[in-house]
């Protein structure tokens, strides 16, 4: 498929990044991910060159990418959205062949979910999804039509970074209105909200508390624990042990969503919190290492040592069991939240999503993407009607 010159102009990033050229540079990006705790850091940078070298420069070393070469797609933000986005990025950058069967396509040993729905394309993974938006396939392993890089920070950082033009996509597990303190009107004027999955945000307790019989709490009890009105497990049917209250860092989407949905206000105070951690993995570690602990976190990070409890809201018990009558996976669960990828509206992209962003995001809005990147990370896949609504936000395919 030949590139359309107008399409390629639209596909060039609004954000300017230096990207290492050549096969070695792109191979090094396969499956890459950045990690940052700073609000000023963007996704992983390209390798620095040695300005002091005395080696003579060759034409190949000094060559620059062509003006119409699509730039690397960058994203950062929420540690909740990170497992989805980073796994998708790893698959994209590897650009596996359709004969693979495990990561892409079909073979005698297996077939990826949703393969028949995609029409069983005779193309590599990134080649296929990028070609839908006019990019020319490379037909090469670890060499997608454009590379992707996902940085790890917080929802607030991701929203600020996409606002400031530091990245293409801002990942957030909280609404951008709350993260940036803006109105819905300003959100609709400046951003496009791409929802790629949902998280039935659980409340978890340490193993000693769960084993002692605290497998359910009421929403009111959780609220009082975080607002320092209940401080001992014996007051909620548990052992005579002080409650160690763990919270997420302020500015994380998990914290914003918890305050909105559990406490009723994104700015609600939580006097009962003993410690805050910036990422879900850090919260998981704290709960594993401390007896008497309680925390709120993303579903993808729960496990045998960090067990979700059932939460009763107004007489309805929502259980962490997909087979229960009412579960934390249901849309009716009050702590259920959308997982967002935000892009920005500019003069160059009045619909708010350029063709690189659309190609990458569209991958998640398929049965293949929902099962491999959303559901496999213990998140909730979108129903068909929601997938169609999200696809309608993307520009027309080539």
Image (spheres, rainbow, N blue to C red):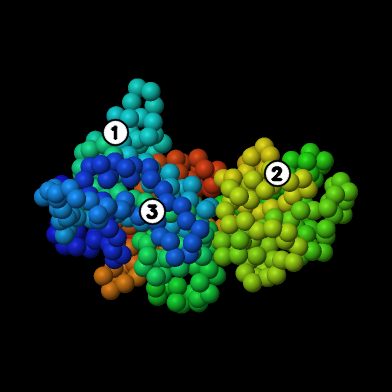
What residue sits right under mark 2 in the picture?
Answer: 289
Residue 44 badge:
3
Residue 98 badge:
1
Q: How many marks?
A: 3
Relative placement, left or right, of 64 versus 93 is left
Place of residue 204 in the rendered image (x, y in percent of width and height, measured from the top left): 69, 48
Residue 143 badge:
none
Place of residue 66 in the rendered image (x, y in percent of width and height, measured from the top left): 15, 56
SS class, disc 2 = helix
Lower position in the chain sequence, tag 2 or tag 3: 3
At a point 32% along the width and 68% down the height, the residue shown is: 351
At a point 78% along the width and 48% down the height, the residue shown is: 292
Give the answer, above or below, for where 80 lies relative to 108.
below
Closer to the camera: disc 2 or disc 1? 2
Lower position in the chain sequence, tag 3 or tag 1: 3
At a point 60% along the width and 50% down the height, the residue shown is: 282
Q: Residues within 10 Å of mark 2 (few under 14, many from 20)?
A: few
Place of residue 67 in the rendered image (x, y in percent of width and height, measured from the top left): 16, 60
SS class, disc 3 = loop
């Amino acid at each position: 498929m030949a590139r359309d010159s107008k399409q390629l102009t639209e596909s060039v990033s609004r954000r300017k990044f230096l990207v290492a050229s050549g096969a070695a540079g792109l191979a090094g990006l396969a499956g890459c991910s950045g990690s940052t705790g700073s609000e000023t850091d963007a996704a992983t940078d390209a390798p620095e060159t040695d300005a002091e070298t005395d080696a003579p420069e060759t034409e190949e070393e000094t060559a620059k990418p062509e003006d119409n070469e699509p730039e690397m797609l960058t994203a950062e933000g929420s540690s909740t959205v990170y497992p989805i986005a980073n796994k998708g990025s790893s698959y994209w950058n590897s650009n596996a062949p359709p004969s693979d069967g495990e990561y892409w396509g079909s073979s005698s040993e297996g077939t990826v979910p949703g393969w028949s729905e995609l029409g069983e394309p005779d193309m590599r993974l990134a080649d296929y999804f990028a070609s839908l938006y006019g990019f020319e396939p490379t037909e090469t392993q670890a060499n997608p039509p454009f590379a992707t890089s996902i940085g790890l920070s917080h929802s607030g950082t991701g929203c600020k970074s996409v606002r400031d033009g530091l990245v293409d996509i801002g990942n957030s597990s909280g609404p951008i209105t709350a993260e940036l303190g803006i109105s819905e009107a300003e959100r609709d004027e400046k951003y496009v909200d791409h929802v790629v999955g949902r998280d039935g945000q659980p409340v978890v307790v340490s193993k000693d508390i769960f084993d002692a019989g605290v497998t359910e709490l009421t929403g009111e009890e959780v609220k009082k624990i975080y607002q320092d009105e209940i401080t001992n497990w014996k007051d909620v049917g548990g052992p005579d042990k002080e409650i160690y209250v763990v919270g997420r860092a302020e500015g994380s989407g998990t914290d914003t969503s918890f305050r909105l949905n559990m406490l009723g206000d994104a700015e609600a105070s939580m006097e009962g919190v003993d410690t805050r951690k910036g990422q879900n993995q850090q919260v998981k570690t704290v709960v594993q290492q401390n007896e008497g602990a309680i925390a709120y976190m993303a579903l993808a990070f729960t496990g045998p040592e960090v067990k979700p409890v059932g939460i009763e809201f107004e007489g309805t018990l929502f259980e962490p069991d997909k087979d229960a009558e009412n579960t934390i996976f249901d849309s009716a669960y009050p702590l259920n939240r959308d997982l967002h990828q935000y892009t920005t509206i500019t003069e160059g992209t009045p619909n708010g999503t350029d063709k690189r962003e659309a190609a990458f995001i569209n991958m998640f809005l398929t049965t293949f993407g929902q099962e491999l990147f959303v559901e496999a990370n213990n998140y909730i896949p979108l129903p068909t009607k929601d997938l169609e609504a999200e696809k309608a936000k993307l520009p027309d395919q080539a």
